[in-house]
Amino acid sequence: MKFSKSFLPTLKETPAEAVIPSHILMIRAGLVRQLSAGIYTWLPLGYKVLRKVMDIIREEMNAIGGQEFHYPALNPKEIWEQTGRVEAFGDIMFHIKNRDYILAPTHEEIVAWHAKGAITSYKDLPQIWYQIQTKFRNEPRPRSGVIRGRQFIMKDSYSLDRSFEDLDKSYELHDRAYRKIFDRCGLKYFVVGASSGAMGGSKSEEFMVKSDAGEDTVAYCEKCGYAANIEVAQSIAAPAKRHEESKEIYEIHTPNVKSIDELCEFLKIDEHETAKSRIYINDGKPVLVLMLGNDEVNETKLQAVLGGNVRPAHPDELKEITGADAGSIGPVGFKHRIIADNLLKDANNLYSGANKNDYHLGGIDLKRDVPQFEYYDLRTVESGEKCIRCNSTLEVFKAIELGHIFKLGTKYSEALGVNYLDESGKEQPIVMGSYGIGVERVLACYLEQNYDERGIIWKKPLAPFEIHLIALNMKNQNVSETSEQLYNELSDAGYEVLFDDRIDVSAGFKFNDADLLGMPIQLIVSEKNLKDGKVELKIRQSGEKYIVQLTELKDKLKKLLNE
RNA sequence: CGGGGAGUAGCUCAGCCCGGCUAGAGCGCUUGGUUUGGGACCAAGAAGUCGCAGGUUCGAAUCCUGUCUCCCCGACCA
């Protein structure tokens, strides 16, 4: 492709609306332009990369027997009402104003609808139906460029099986296909087991990429691969001690000591000798949640333990409930329900709030001083703690969800009456699975992992072009003729070549554009080297340069591109 | 939906607090010329309903009210 004839709007300056690297690079390198919040146009170069991602996905989906469909994005609302998902999606679903249609946020209903009556026998099963299509979700807050948009491209596939045992097989096929897809795209990713929540199913896994731009927080063990959403993650952490002898409770005047850190500093004690209290309101009733030291309450775990409605108490409620303000609250003498984290089990000689402003208590023995204690896992895992599986070190970080695979079961087939006849002639609901990949997210994640201060670094599988041919001075006849000839020869030889043939652009400008656009190899044609019949090859990623004879160019290219 | 920030030329932004000449800069763009190994130089030029609506005023980019849009943090995220 010739640069001079292409729409390739590169930007020298960082656009104001972009914050994260992938978003900045997508705009600067002319891959996308924003139309509205969470709505992007893919420009030719960006779409070329996106197609490469889609091609890889297609190949791997076809390899597990997937059949490509193209379902409509515009759906009759009625079908979605039958599964109760118009209500379930609520404001997230886009509704058409002048007809009873919705814009599809996913396609379980439509797949089930088509399967109904068409798949009638066990002999028709299993099936894997997939598509690569635009999805619409009215996200309250689109963010991070294409990572969370109101309109985005998803590869979604659906397995149709006769039994849960067969669903396991379809699920495994997808699991393997997804790993191949992300491997081929050159992504560093990991897999998190998750509960399937409101999708209604038994098992699900999320494919994640570590990134500060991510919306999920996960705990991950590099060594054994243990990975869990922070909401459910567990770890091995040192518990509070039970000393042989319990001291007597005693009151300590602690003026202006509000936090655990301040308490430790004031009394010269260790965090593990302290207990922090948090008051929550559960269905209108106060609950004291006692945590060891500076451990944070994990509200998802707390919610699971308490059930019902859970919220932190307001500051003005604290005084009324405990007699003290935040920073001086403790379990001794607390008149309502108390639950504590497992790490505090049976601890003694603890320091905690006295339920009296500016006072703490020492010598607390939870067994002795606090009646009716309940212990649960309530803490939030932190970086550096030990893996519950292999005891090596856990890391906690943000991550982007790239793909999600679900065992759906019969929720949709039962709601829509999608049945088949088994060998004995008995009617059975089809067992479904659903498997998504955020296509744009693959690209965004790739960029988050492959760039430097000069721009994008494409590796061959996704690179829009393999070779960026740079003619340094097109006004020099030798340079323009040679580079033109190289462009034709290399293109004919099957290489994808981007030819910077711009006449009135200076050398430095071309170099900077080339580094920004990030093709794996830059082929530089200049007067200087051409005098000796030579050209220069530069590897974008490493910066290595080779001056080669024109006659040896193709051999060298072959070598470099196959490395 | 809560909190914060921003809308002025294609892009990045200044001007606004303290109202007052034809509304500016850099980059980009057009034309001519000189340049061509790391975002060149000279000259001439085109380009803005100052987000929108209303108000105050002799006079509004600037002050007031409303409204829309965008960005960030949070909530939310099958």
Image (cartoon, coloured by chain):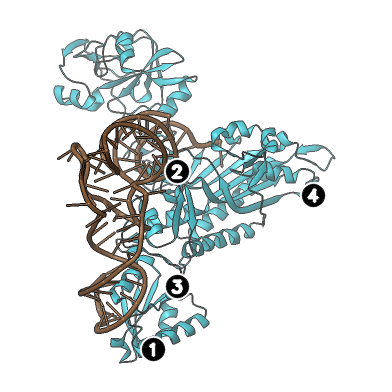
Chain colours: A cyan, B brown
Q: Which residue is mark 4?
A: A123
Q: Which sits in the foreground, A489 or B2?
A: B2
Looking at the rendered structure, the secondary structure element under dot 2 is loop
x and y percent of residue A88 in the render?
59, 32
**Please, what is the three-letter code of the amino acid marked with disc 1?**
Leu
Residue A493 visible within the image: no
Q: Identify the residue shown where x is 36% and y is 83%.
A: A474
Q: Which residue is mark 3?
A: A466
Q: CA distance from mark 2 to mark 3?
A: 33 Å
Which one is earlier in the sequence, the residue at label 2 or at label 3?
Answer: 2
x and y percent of residue A49 in the render?
49, 63
Q: Nearer the viewer, mark 2 or mark 1?
A: 2
Q: Which residue is mark 2?
A: A142
**Please, what is the three-letter code of the amino acid marked with disc 3?**
Glu
Residue A24, picture quadrant:
bottom left
Residue A312 visible within the image: yes
Which one is earlier in the sequence, the residue at label 3 or at label 4?
Answer: 4
Q: Nearer the viewer, mark 3 or mark 4?
A: 3
Which one is earlier in the sequence, the residue at label 2 or at label 1?
Answer: 2
How crowded pointer 3 is (Cα within 10 Å; few <14, some 14-19, many 20+) is rated as many
What is the total number of numbered labels drawn onto the structure image?
Answer: 4
Q: Which residue is mark 1?
A: A550
x and y percent of residue A242 in the render?
28, 20
Chain of the residue on which disc 4 is drawn: A
Farthest residue, direction right: A425
Q: Does residue B47 sit above or below A333 in this rendering?
A: below
Mark 2 and 1 residues: CB-CB less than 8 Å, in contact? no
